[in-house]
Amino acid sequence: MLKVGPRLLHSIRFRVLMSKYWIIKSSILEAIMCGIIGYSGPRKTSTVLLEGLRRLEYRGYDSAGIAVGGKSCTDGKLQVVKEVGKISALRAAMPADIDGSWGIGHTRWATHGGVTHANAHPHIDNSGKIAVVHNGIIENHTALKTMLQKKGCVFRTETDSEVIPHLIAQYYKGDLAEAVKAAIQNLEGTYGIACIHLDEPGRIVGARNGSPLIVGVGVGEMFLASDITAMVAYTDKVVYLNDGELVDIDEHSYSIIGKDEQKVERTTNQITWELGSIEKGDYPCHMEKEIFEQPESIARALSGRIDAENATAKLGGLNLDRSRLLNVGRVKIIAAGTSWHAGLVGSYLLEQVARIPAQAELASEIRYRNPVVERDSLWFAVSQSGETADSLFAMREVQRKGATVLGICNVVGSTIARESDGGIYVHSGPEIAVASTKAFTSQLAAFYLFTLLSARMRNMSREEGIHFAGALQSVPGMVAETLKARDHVQRIAKKYCRAKDFLFLGRGILYPIALEGALKLKEISYIHAEGCSAGEMKHGPIALISPEVPSVFLVSDDYLREKTISNIREIKARGGPVIVVGVEGDTETAALADEFIPVPKTDPRFYPFSMVVPLQLFAYFCALELGRDVDQPRNLAKSVTVE
């Protein structure tokens, strides 16, 4: 370890202590996932890195850069190219003569420091021979920076990440892996890093603590990335790193070192995603493509999991025996954002159908609430990426208290998938657009399957199970039918997209769908929208009603229909425009509404699948009409992997 004075040591210890309990309240509160790519092999490295960064751009698009070692490094330094803006700007700035056989790249979402050329990654040490890309938060970076400056290190950026190459340089004695291993012992916080040194051709060293890193195994070439999408064009074999592990790769091999500094043997995983699944194809945007993929993605989530003969579900990945499932007394669901809305639907469903008390919790809140874990409780952690920091940390906290936690994830091999006690993969395929659509409905499918399984073990008869399973199997076709309203929704969006505020209202199991509709509109169109229960409208939100504030109602044909219609009449009496997503053939509601979007009639418990689709399309077309970047909205990126 580096030698430090007693006052500075006290400062570092204090920061470490505080970081165990509270997140430092500064600009680091909401760090968004950046993208990392590394390559060693015979291809033109700059081309591989740029292509990888293009596929990672949905994880951050403030700035980007690469560092390459090889023939073009004629001045004794790594060749580094950085640019503010999207990957296209970096591509335009790339020198024609850049060459090399190994290198690293990064696409940034700004946390520490502004969006500037200097703050873009990679960061280098003072010699120019060491380059590092980093995703995460170094919480003790201020103390480390002070210490390193006293040792003569010159800092050129405002980022926390720049301390890493300077630390590695302090320890470097001719072996990059040893220097990285020593340097990370000083770091407090989260990191996924990739590092290269000009004097060690072909070598890339990576380390992970709370931020994903994946090794890609090719033939005569190796990759290191934060996401498999970065390398799926070149290899279908990957190895996932765990927290506390370091990886040392060259073009022919990789070696993983664990926390105990012993070599780790790990099985190679096969990627099942095809390259075409992460491209837009004939669609103008990834989001529209993913909205229209929902009939297929829901079908994949259900495939092989409905036991029609016994009118139940088959979920082999739960790793729970029948006795444990039968004795579940309460279900708690941990999630964030769109996944939390899916969890809310799941909680309604489990209580109504399986008669199990259920509650969906915001992961960012429950982690710090000292949650109570009952002995008969079962917990779910829901995350599209399986890397969402709030959900991961909350999952670990309740596991420490003895909870059994099942994961609901899309990404095979993700951290939540590996650390949970069992779970359900939703198989929605790669989701590239920042605003989640098909992963949401696939998560719903997972909750419906678990509800069917649980209900059939309790109070649901075989006849009711047959009906429920049949309705569930019909969902892909119902969603496909709903998607035919595309042009109708586009016309409505064009009419209303200039409104500054929207209300989204639903009752019962459709209340979470109202929340999701409002979130989608906010995410990609930047229009303020509020989702609320229609039953709560008179307790405050009705004060917002005016001719300039449209209300979007979700109207089922269940026992709450008449109450929701009464709410619509109240809005109309106050001059508010009303858009209704309702059941096909509901002429009474259609006559009340200014605009009516029909969905196919089904069992009322299954309307969350179909009624969310017009809301997704509405948000999408509003954003297009307003000239927004639909796939990469401002201030957002795909996964929040550090707090």
Image (cartoon, rainbow, N blue to C red):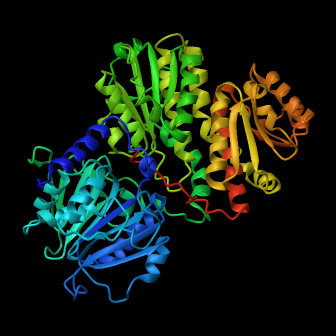
Asked whether 271 or 370 is in front, the reply is 370
**x, y percentage for residue 144?**
24, 56
**x, y percentage for residue 108?**
42, 63
Asked whether 171 or 567 is in front, the reply is 171
Name the residue at 55% across, 41% down: 338
Residue 36 visible in this rendered orientation of the protein = yes
Asked whether 523 or 223 is in front, the reply is 523
In which quadrant of the rendered image does the C terminus lie? top left
Name the residue at 75% across, 46% down: 501
> Please, is residue 456 above or below residue 528 in the view?
above
Residue 217 visible in this rendered orientation of the protein = no
Locate residue 286 relative to residue 111 in the image: left or right: right
Name the residue at 56% across, 29% down: 344
> Please, is residue 292 above or below residue 555 in the view?
below
Name the residue at 65% across, 49% down: 522
Residue 199 falls in image quadrant: bottom left
> Please, is residue 387 above or below residue 91 in the view?
above
Residue 594 falls in image quadrant: top right
Asked whether 477 or 599 is in front, the reply is 599
**x, y percentage for residue 348?**
58, 23
Number of residue marks: 0
Locate residue 124 relative to residue 472 in the image: left or right: left
**x, y percentage for residue 179?**
13, 61
